[in-house]
């Protein structure tokens, strides 16, 4: 039990060190871009603040090194083997080589919270994370060469798809290194080690809406059913043919639902989750974004990890804010946005589940995202025929209606989405409950006119264009 505890503590401290190395890299890049943006203007207060922040990060990195060393000493005293320390000692690795392993060992989680997938970092990224300046890269790149200790001993490997320079080549841990570092990982609770349990980044709930309860255009329903059917068959074939180890990435079923609000995008996500027998996990921009360096990136990784752990359908609300086209890096903000975009693409590439992006706005997506989206569907304001069905479904026989209520007239007169019709129905039912009188046609017309004015005022259903 004591050995399990020290293993978890060591992994936790290694993960924290990795975060600090990423934070330092972000601070350096942000400061460099800000200097360029200021074009030589002096800002002593800004300079002093950045120096303090950088010095604090360096202090934290030094502290984490000391903590790892202390834990390694404690492990030796009780005869506990730490996988990473064993590799360092066996192959006589230096500190840089040890840190490269740490940077590559923490990536994603599989459904049970165990480390399984590999994060690719380029040679340039790894050298930057180690704290080296660009002019030092040529001298230090040798630690990633074919004859280096890390590659010669089969601890890291380049992405087989890369035929580029070592600066551009993407590296990951080998299976041998993964097994050595994590050892009896199945017996440990890794979520405890990195604090991922219950992140609260996703709003996870049981789906309450089925396909039988929503009205979709026939082509939308057919397209979704076809994709879900293919997904189920593909999953079985991957298992039967045992090619999961060959096709390790790009297996996510990703869809984009776009169109005016209230047209059934979220309801359709719930119906999909219900059909697949899964929960739905909703992530939105406000929850994921954080003003502190590196925190937004960690939130993205945690959101995907939480979706895997819960086995839920992952839905990104306000997707236009997250999955936009990469920008020309003329400012530090542009650089930060591009980092997020790259990370999102990487996480989407390695996700093995269903991801749905929803947005009310026109989306100009990055081409790399476009290639990864399996199905793109526009949800329009329903036709008058469908609107009649929606009106009727919201007023079952048990609700008292005046004999003059005509749903056909309402459907033809008011071009409202299903969500806006629901708003009208709720207001009418509340007024009915308060007054004790049956709902009249005049009441529904008045409330529908108010809802239509609200839509016009907010501009939510106006001027939407397909991407």
Image (spheres, helix red, strand yellow):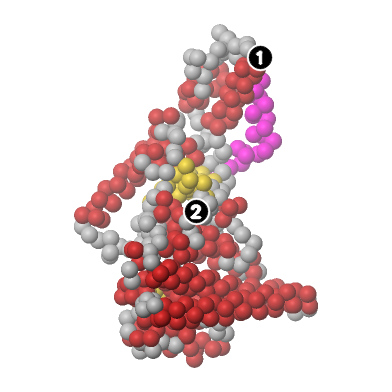
Between label 1 and label 2, give the one nearer the viewer: 2
What residue is rendered at 61% in x and 67% in y?
A: 293
Instruction: Please name the residue that numbered disc 1 is placed on.
Output: 435
Looking at marks 1 and 2 on the same chain, the residue that comes earlier in the sequence is marked by: 2
Locate the N terminus by quadrant: bottom left
* Residue 56 forms part of the magenta stretch: no
Mark 1 touches mark 2? (CB < 8 Å): no
Marks 1 and 2, how far apart in space?
45 Å
Q: Which residues are magenta?
A: 442-467
Residue closest to the far top: 403
Task: Tell me the number on the disc at residue 198.
Answer: 2
What residue is rendered at 55% in x and 66% in y?
A: 339
Question: In the rendered image, is residue 174 in sight?
Answer: no
Name the quadrant containing residue 292: bottom right
- Where residue 451 appears, x then y in whole percent? 64, 28
- Where residue 294 appears, x then y in whole percent? 57, 66
């Amino acid at each position: 039990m004591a050995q399990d505890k020290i293993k978890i503590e060591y992994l936790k401290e290694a993960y924290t060190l990795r975060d600090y190395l990423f934070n330092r890299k972000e601070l350096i890049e942000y400061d460099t871009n800000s200097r360029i943006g200021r074009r030589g203007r002096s800002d002593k207060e800004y300079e002093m603040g950045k120096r303090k922040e950088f010095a604090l990060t360096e202090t934290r990195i030094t502290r984490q090194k000391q903590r790892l060393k202390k834990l390694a000493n404690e492990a030796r005293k009780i005869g506990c083997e730490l996988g990473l320390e064993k590799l360092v000692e066996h192959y006589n690795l230096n500190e840089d080589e040890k840190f490269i392993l740490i940077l590559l060992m923490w990536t994603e989680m599989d459904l049970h919270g165990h480390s399984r997938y590999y994060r690719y970092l380029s040679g340039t990224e790894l050298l930057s994370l180690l704290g080296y300046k660009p002019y030092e890269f040529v001298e230090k790149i040798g630690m990633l060469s074919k004859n280096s200790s890390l590659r010669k001993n089969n601890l890291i490997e380049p992405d087989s798809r890369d035929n580029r320079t070592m600066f551009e080549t993407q590296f990951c841990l080998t299976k041998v290194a993964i097994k050595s570092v994590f050892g009896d990982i199945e017996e440990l609770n890794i979520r405890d080690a990195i604090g991922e349990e219950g992140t609260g980044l996703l709003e996870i709930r049981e789906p309450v809406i089925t396909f039988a309860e929503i009205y979709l255009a026939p082509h939308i329903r057919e397209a979704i059913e076809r994709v879900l059917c293919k997904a189920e068959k593909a999953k079985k074939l991957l298992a039967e043919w045992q090619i999961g180890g060959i096709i390790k990435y790009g297996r996510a079923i990703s869809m984009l639902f776009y169109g005016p609000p209230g047209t059934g995008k979220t309801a359709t996500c719930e119906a999909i989750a219900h059909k697949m027998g899964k929960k739905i996990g909703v992530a939105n921009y406000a929850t994921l974004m954080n003003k502190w360096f590196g925190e937004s990136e960690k939130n993205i990784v945690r959101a995907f990890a939480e979706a895997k752990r819960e086995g839920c359908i992952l839905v990104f609300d306000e997707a236009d804010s997250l999955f936009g086209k990469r920008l020309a890096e003329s400012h530090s903000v542009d650089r930060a946005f591009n980092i997020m975009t790259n990370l999102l693409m990487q996480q989407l590439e390695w996700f093995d589940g269903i991801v749905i992006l929803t947005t009310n706005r026109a989306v100009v997506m990055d081409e790399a995202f476009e290639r990864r989206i399996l199905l793109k569907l526009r949800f329009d304001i329903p036709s008058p025929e469908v609107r009649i069905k929606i009106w009727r479904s919201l007023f079952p026989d048990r609700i008292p209606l005046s004999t003059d209520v005509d749903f056909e007239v309402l459907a033809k007169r008011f071009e409202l989405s299903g969500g806006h019709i629901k708003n009208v129905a709720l207001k009418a039912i509340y007024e009915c409950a308060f007054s004790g009188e049956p709902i009249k046609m005049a009441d529904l017309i008045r409330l529908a006119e108010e809802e239509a004015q609200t839509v016009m005022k907010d501009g939510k259903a106006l001027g939407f264009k397909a991407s």
